[in-house]
């Protein structure tokens, strides 16, 4: 009898072991398999929250099939204590394992609300926008000019939210003076900038910032970024260029940046200026004349006068030979690369095709051909003015 009981008990134990093993294998597969989400969602993790609250919210949102299994998996992976506050984008079909990694890896929030401080050549704006998880695109909530407009309630509200992200976006071709002026308008930054940074030394890009960060530290990040870009482009430059230093290449890049807003033309424009330098011709470029007038402090806002074209300033390339002494703006990576790797062309001249700068330029080899292109452009100007 006892032998029979022992045999049954052993059989029962074996069955239990197999059931447990099967359940464990199922749980492991469930944890790493594709999840039930049919479209991306934004998951907000509040400061002081815990995995229980987050897992229950994910289950309620249909992101996971079992809140308990998510917690068990996170605990087994040793990530329960690594939960990070923020707003995180959970993609369609994300597994429990992937979701745990998303909410514990840290770093900037990947969805939710962000504020973008845009510094462009003509004006500065503050944009409040929110990511739509379904489309992966940002939806604008509010936009204003901090120097001219009243601060909208939407901006004040998102500043009070702990997971709001902030970025400063610099357009290519802005001047160092403009950047310092606009950074002074950003109310989440602190401190002053003692001196205007050297023209051309700040890399146009998008910079993540945090409330309380100093303006000086942000400027230093922009300078380090430009140093890296210039060093890399200089190391990969063409042979036999008419520059004696990376600084001269940066000057040329700033002129290219201001001469064309058409990305495909940068290397062509670069070829024109390189050809002129090689032939000992003056660069004769209007943006340098304008910089000699404004010193980069704002936009000229009118046409260049004939007297200004003849005026001898250090930057007037109608008067001085070669390159001006400094850059005339902060060029982006593409303009720097164009300055150091120009197209090989015979072009010496160029003029705008139409009154719309985005339409690009007509390039010419001979003065006769260039004069024809100029005449066509002047005709368009006359048409507009009549």
Image (cartoon, rainbow, N blue to C red):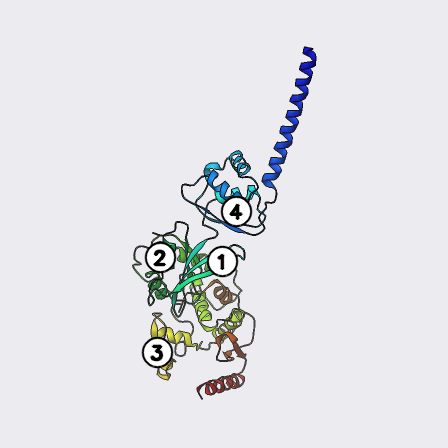
Horizontally, residue 317 falls left or right of residue 100, namely left
- Give the residue pinned by disc 4: 61
Q: Secondary structure at mark 2?
A: helix
**Alpha-carbon distance for marks 1 and 4?**
47 Å
Residue 21 rendering spot, x and y as whole percentages = 63, 29
**Alpha-carbon distance for marks 4 and 3?**
68 Å
Horizontally, residue 150 falls left or right of residue 21, namely left
Which numbered disc, 1 or 3, marks the residue that appears first in the sequence?
1
Horizontally, residue 29 falls left or right of residue 363, namely right
Which numbered disc, 1 or 4, marks the residue that appears first in the sequence?
4
Q: Secondary structure at mark 4?
A: loop
Residue 364 rendering spot, x and y as whole percentages = 54, 80
Label 2 or label 1, whichever lies nearer to me, is: 2
User: How dense is the environment of label 2, judged by Cα within 10 Å: few (below 14), some, or many (20 and up)?
Assistant: few
> Which quarter shows the N terminus?
top right
Q: Are marks 2 and 4 in contact (CB under 8 Å)?
A: no
Residue 204 makes an appearance in the image: no
Q: Nearer the viewer, residue 307 or 166?
A: 166
- Give the residue pinned by disc 2: 156
Residue 65 rendering spot, x and y as whole percentages = 57, 41
Give the quadrant of residue 182: bottom left
Q: Nearer the viewer, residue 336 or 278?
A: 336
**Alpha-carbon distance for marks 2 and 3?**
49 Å
Which numbered disc, 2 or 4, marks the residue that appears first in the sequence?
4
User: How dense is the environment of label 3, judged by Cα within 10 Å: few (below 14), some, or many (20 and up)?
Assistant: some
- Give the residue pinned by disc 1: 232
Which numbered disc, 2 or 3, marks the residue that appears first in the sequence?
2
Q: Are marks 2 and 3 in contact (CB under 8 Å)?
A: no
Which numbered disc, 2 or 1, marks the residue that appears first in the sequence?
2
Label 4 or label 3, whichever lies nearer to me, is: 4
- Give the residue pinned by disc 3: 312
């Amino acid at each position: 009898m006892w032998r029979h009981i022992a045999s049954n008990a052993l059989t029962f134990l074996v069955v239990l072991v197999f059931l447990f093993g099967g359940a464990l294998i199922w749980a492991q597969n469930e944890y790493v398999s594709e999840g039930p989400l049919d479209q991306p969602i934004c998951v907000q993790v509040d400061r002081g929250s815990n995995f229980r609250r987050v897992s229950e919210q994910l289950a309620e949102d249909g992101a996971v099939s079992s809140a308990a299994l998510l917690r068990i998996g996170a605990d087994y992976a040793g990530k329960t204590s690594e939960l990070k506050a923020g707003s995180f984008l959970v993609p369609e079909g994300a597994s429990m394992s992937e979701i745990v990694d998303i909410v514990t890896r840290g770093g900037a929030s990947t969805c939710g609300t962000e504020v973008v401080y845009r510094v462009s050549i003509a004006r500065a704006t503050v944009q409040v926008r929110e990511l739509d998880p379904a489309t992966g695109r940002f939806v604008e909530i509010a936009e204003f000019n901090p120097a001219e407009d009243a601060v909208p309630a939407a901006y004040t509200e998102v500043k009070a939210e702990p997971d709001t992200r902030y970025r400063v976006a610099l357009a290519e071709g802005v001047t160092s003076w403009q950047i310092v002026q606009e950074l002074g308008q950003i109310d989440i930054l602190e401190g002053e900038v003692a001196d205007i940074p050297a023209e051309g030394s700040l890399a146009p890009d998008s910079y993540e910032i945090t409330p309380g960060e100093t303006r000086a530290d942000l400027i230093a990040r922009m300078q380090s970024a430009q140093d890296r870009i210039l060093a890399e482009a200089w190391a990969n430059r063409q042979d036999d260029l008419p520059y004696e230093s990376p600084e001269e290449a940066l000057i040329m890049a700033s002129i290219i940046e201001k001469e064309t807003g058409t990305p495909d033309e940068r290397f062509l424009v670069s070829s024109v200026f390189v050809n002129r330098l090689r032939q000992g011709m003056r660069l004769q470029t209007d943006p340098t004349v304008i910089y000699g007038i404004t010193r980069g402090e704002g936009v000229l806002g009118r046409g260049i006068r004939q007297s200004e074209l003849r005026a001898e300033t250090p930057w007037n390339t109608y008067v001085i030979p070669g390159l001006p002494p400094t850059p005339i703006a902060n060029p982006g990576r593409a303009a720097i690369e164009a300055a150091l790797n120009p197209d090989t062309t015979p072009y010496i001249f160029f003029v705008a095709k139409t009154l719309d700068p985005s339409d690009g330029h007509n390039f010419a080899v001979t003065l006769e051909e260039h004069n024809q292109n100029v005449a066509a452009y002047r005709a368009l100007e006359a048409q507009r003015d009549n």
